[in-house]
């Protein structure tokens, strides 16, 4: 009595939706980040490409199947016929006994980025740490990092996925963990829960419309309210609308309600998500801070009165960016917080008015993307009354530091008002004109058909006379949002922007180039004549076509260092250039449509 339809958008970024309609064609429900290889009306099951089987009534995982390309179905005998890697599979639709889940595997942390690290709320007693790795796995230590196991037990396993894990705030009692994640832009992993410290996991997908989860938030009194929120990304292929959403659960994740969507553009501007604290009856388990990251993660802002923000003296070196601001245990009474970048750590003990900085030689090389701090956390108070900093590195380590023994250097305390010009970042190239314009802010109203920028780039433009002089007025009030892809190279990055169909190359020498994306499905994705050296890759598809057809670019940017990654982009045109944000990276692009300089 239902129709199940897959819908897909496929370019550099691939989105998948599963729509469920009644027999008259009226929609019943849908899922983002889900599609089926085969719908079996006889068993009420759907078979997924990743080997999972879902119940068609609830759209939740119920088991596994030997994933194959289904070639035929014998309904009378209940047999599926499929092909995989040159072999023919004959599969009984009723399946067999559910096998026991795999226990945690004794494995050291992999030699890859540690993208997340978390300390147990009961760390002083259980010494438990969780680490998320770039290869899509979650690791657990119960001896404060001395040894590790990789968690399995039914948890999705895919080297291309991204998983985020979180302790229940009541973990010391309930031993409960939650995980959510995604595989690129096209596949959602939903929400999973473990009630035995991570040994076994169960899917919690009931009424979870958007399966590409990226963050979990808990009520401050989670033990009583059982309220948590998952933040997800979504793309509605039929409506061509992308954004973010909050699903709320008031029963520990057993059921979900899609409460609000946001993060998408309308003729009236961008619709933001509300503060997640509005969905948590007792507020967030994480206290509100008087310090926060600046819009482009290049500085830290602090407030004295809760309304006026000032720029603190935290200044990452070169192109280094901040990725965390973390409160110390006892905040806000302690007024102590830490700001973390890839190379340095800063500490304030007075809510951001003054700071001290810690540096370490192992993270200092600006061009070494691996020997960097990639994630951080702070433990609860220990029995001694102290606490520890946990740092996840790009080389597969979790480093544990005692802040009382770290060599802190005071940072000069002259603060900069948020509405005053911020110091311009140093650039190691000459500007395109021999006599740059004086860094005076643009005053008055913009000329006809031009705009003072609004939205994501507004504060950056307003606070930087240099950007105002370099770019001029905006040619559109709001930035345009859409999909993107990014790939790292020896000497820069390449970015594909979906909404204008162009590929940008940002070189480390401070110049950029732009190319039309002419790749079409069916074109060669790569050229075997180009053999990359060990540890490097040949770019593929649209990036590869531009790279192969432009020898000057190929010589300048070098080989790819990793596969291309899906992302999202905001782009806003100005009189003399463009502002472009791809994920957490922002580029001020001075020049024509084809080339120029960036910072």
Image (cartoon, rainbow, N blue to C red):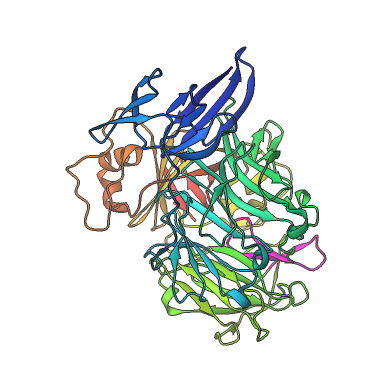
355 vs 326, nearest the viewer? 326
Q: Is residue 489 left or right of residue 172?
A: left
Residue 580 rendering spot, x and y as whole percentages: 53, 46
Residue 331 rendering spot, x and y as whole percentages: 74, 72
**Is 73 drawn above or below residue 252 in the view shown?**
above
**Is 32 drawn above or below residue 384 in the view shown?**
above
Question: Which picture quadrant has residue 106?
Answer: bottom left
Q: Which residues are magenta?
A: 290-311
Q: Is residue 368 left or right of residue 140?
A: left
Give the quarter of the figure containing the N terminus: top right
Q: Is residue 530 left or right of residue 586?
A: left
**Is 151 drawn above or below residue 587 in the view shown?**
below
560 vs 228, nearest the viewer? 228
Residue 74 rendering spot, x and y as whole percentages: 36, 19
Judge whether residue 293 is colored magenta: yes
Judge whether residue 102 is colored magenta: no
Q: Is residue 516 visible?
A: yes
38 vs 246, nearest the viewer? 38
Question: Which picture quadrant has residue 415?
Answer: bottom right
**Is 367 drawn above or below residue 432 in the view shown?**
below
């Amino acid at each position: 009595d239902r129709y199940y339809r897959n819908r897909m958008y496929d370019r550099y970024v691939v989105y998948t939706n599963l729509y469920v309609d009644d027999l008259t064609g009226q929609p019943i429900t849908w899922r983002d980040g889900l599609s089926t290889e085969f719908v079996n009306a006889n068993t009420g099951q759907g078979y997924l490409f990743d080997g999972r089987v879902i119940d068609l009534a609830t759209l939740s995982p119920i088991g596994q199947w030997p994933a194959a390309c289904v070639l035929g179905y014998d309904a009378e005998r209940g047999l599926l016929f499929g092909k995989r890697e040159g072999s023919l599979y004959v599969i009984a639709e009723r399946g067999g006994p559910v096998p026991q889940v795999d226990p945690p595997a004794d494995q050291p942390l992999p030699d890859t980025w540690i993208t997340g690290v978390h300390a147990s709320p009961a760390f002083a007693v259980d010494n438990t740490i969780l680490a998320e790795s770039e290869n899509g796995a979650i690791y657990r230590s119960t001896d404060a990092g001395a040894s590790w196991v990789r968690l399995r037990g039914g948890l999705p396993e895919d080297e291309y996925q991204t998983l985020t894990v979180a302790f229940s705030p009541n973990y010391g009692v309930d031993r409960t963990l939650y995980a959510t994640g995604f595989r690129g832009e096209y596949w959602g992993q939903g929400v999973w829960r473990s009630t035995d410290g991570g040994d076994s996991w169960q899917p919690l997908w009931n009424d979870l419309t958007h399966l590409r989860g990226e963050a979990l938030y808990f009520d401050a009194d989670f033990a009583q309210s059982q309220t948590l929120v998952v933040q997800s990304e979504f793309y509605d292929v039929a409506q061509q609308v992308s954004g973010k959403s909050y699903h709320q659960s008031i029963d520990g994740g057993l059921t979900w309600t899609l409460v609000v969507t946001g993060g998408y553009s309308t003729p009236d501007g961008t619709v933001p998500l509300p503060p997640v604290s509005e969905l948590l009856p007792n507020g967030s388990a994480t206290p509100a801070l008087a310090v926060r990251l600046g819009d482009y993660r290049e500085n830290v802002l602090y407030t004295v009165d809760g309304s006026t923000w000032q720029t603190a003296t935290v200044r990452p070196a070169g192109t280094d960016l901040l990725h965390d601001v973390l409160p110390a245990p006892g905040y806000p009474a302690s007024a102590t917080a830490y700001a973390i970048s890839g190379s340095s750590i800063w500490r304030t003990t007075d809510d951001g008015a003054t700071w001290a900085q810690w540096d370490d030689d192992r993270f200092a090389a600006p061009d070494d993307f691996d020997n960097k701090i990639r994630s951080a956390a702070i433990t609860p108070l220990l029995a001694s009354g102290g606490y520890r900093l946990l740092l996840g590195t790009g080389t597969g380590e979790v480093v544990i530091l005692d802040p009382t023994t770290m060599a802190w250097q005071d940072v000069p305390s002259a603060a900069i008002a948020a509405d005053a010009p911020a110091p311009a970042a140093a650039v190691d190239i000459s500007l395109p004109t021999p006599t740059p314009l004086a860094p005076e802010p643009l005053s008055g109203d913009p000329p006809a058909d031009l705009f003072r920028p609004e939205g994501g780039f507004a504060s950056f433009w307003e606070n930087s006379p240099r950007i105002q002089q370099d770019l001029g007025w905006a040619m559109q009030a709001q930035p345009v949002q859409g999909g993107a892809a990014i790939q790292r190279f020896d000497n820069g990055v390449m970015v594909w922007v979906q909404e204008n169909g162009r590929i940008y190359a940002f070189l480390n020498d401070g110049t950029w180039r732009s190319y039309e994306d002419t790749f079409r499905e069916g074109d060669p994705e790569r050229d075997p004549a180009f053999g990359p050296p060990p540890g490097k890759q040949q770019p593929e598809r649209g990036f590869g076509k531009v790279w192969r057809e432009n020898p000057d670019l190929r010589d300048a940017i070098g080989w790819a260092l990793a596969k291309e990654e899906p992302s999202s982009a905001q782009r806003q045109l100005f009189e003399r250039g463009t502002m472009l944000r791809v994920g957490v990276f922002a580029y001020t692009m001075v020049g024509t449509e084809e080339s120029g300089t960036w910072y």
